[in-house]
Image (cartoon, rainbow, N blue to C red):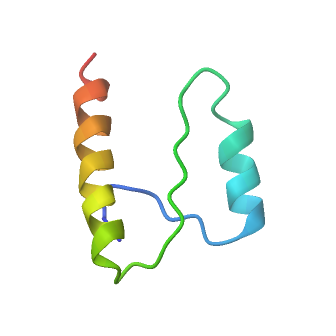
Amino acid sequence: MSLFLPKLSCKKDIDDAIKSVAEKVLVLRFGRDEDSVCLQLDEILITFSMAHKAI
């Protein structure tokens, strides 16, 4: 898992994240940290997130 993306490890964390982002886009990626496809997706999400923080 990336250091730049928060890890939600229980249902309460997921519920809190959903409830706290009323005016934002929330992307949840389910998968294993050691899966290469998940790691590639993490890199894409980080790039997108950093590009939109500047706006």
Residue farthest to the front? 37
Q: Where's residue 42, x and y in %? A: 32, 58
Is 36 on the left-hand or right-hand side of 21?
left
Q: Indicate the quadrant where residue 20 lies.
A: top right
Image quadrant in which you'd find residue 40? bottom left
Residue 26, by quadrant, is: top right
Percent of width and height locating residue 14: 69, 56
5 relative position to 20: left or right: left
Instruction: Please state the horizontal and vertical placement of residue 50, each as a whole percent of the image.
Output: 25, 36
Task: Please provide percent x and percent y for residue 38.
Answer: 36, 68
Q: Residue at x 58, y 64 (%)?
A: 8
- Which residue lies at the image location 30% right of the left edge and 27% below the top edge? 53
Q: Residue furthest top?
A: 55
Q: Is residue 13 above or below residue 53?
A: below
Q: Quadrant of the N terminus?
A: bottom left
Foreground residue among 26 and 35: 35
Along the line of sight, which residue is nearer the eye, 8 or 43?
43
The number of numbered discs placed on residues in the rendered structure image is 0
